[in-house]
């Protein structure tokens, strides 16, 4: 799962920040800044989605527990 996320991050940020034709062997300042921001945003969104899914899952578990307790009464 982590390698999949890493591969998606690399692909997305590379497409966004690095031109198709390389003019210099090293990253330029603009490319570096773009990559830093892209990676930070990608990881932030990934973390937010993970928390949201975790909260949703926890809520469903609590709902099932309540239903089971009501059925036992």
Image: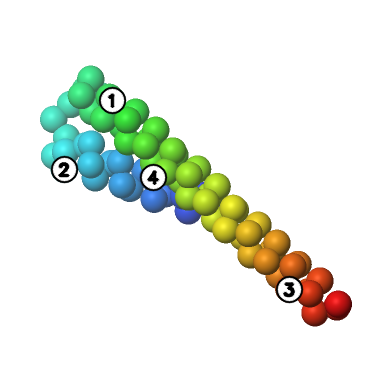
Of the 4 image quadrants, the one containing the N terminus is bottom right
What residue do we see at 64% from left, 65% from top?
60
Which mark is in front, 3 or 2? Answer: 3
Front residue of 34 and 70: 70
Residue 29 at least partly seen = yes
Q: Are marks 1 and 2 in contact (CB under 8 Å)?
A: no
The mark that comes first in sequence, 3 or 2, is 2
Q: Mark 1: few, some, or many residues within 10 Å (few <14, many ≥20)?
A: some
Q: Give the mark nearer the N terminus: 4 vs 3.
A: 4
Q: What residue do we see at 32% from left, 30% from top?
A: 37
- The answer to whether the residues at label 4 and label 2 have Cβ atoms under 8 Å apart is no
Query: Mark 3 — residue?
Result: 67
Gap between marks 3 and 2 measured at Cα = 56 Å
| Numbered label attached to residue 9 | 4
Residue 32: image tag: 1
How far is disc 3 from disc 1 in space, using C-alphas?
A: 52 Å
Could you give the CA–CA distance between mark 1 and mark 2, rounded to whole angstroms?
Answer: 15 Å
* Residue labelled with disc 2: 20
Label 2, residues with CA under 10 Å away: few <14, some 14-19, many ≥20: few
- Measure the C-alpha gap from mark 4 to mark 3: 40 Å
């Amino acid at each position: 799962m982590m390698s999949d996320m890493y591969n998606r991050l690399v692909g997305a940020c590379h497409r966004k920040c690095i031109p198709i034709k390389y003019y210099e062997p090293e990253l330029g300042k603009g490319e570096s800044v773009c990559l830093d921001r892209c990676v930070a945003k990608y990881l932030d969104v990934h973390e937010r989605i993970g928390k949201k899914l975790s909260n949703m899952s926890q809520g469903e578990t609590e709902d099932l527990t309540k239903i089971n307790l009501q059925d036992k009464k």
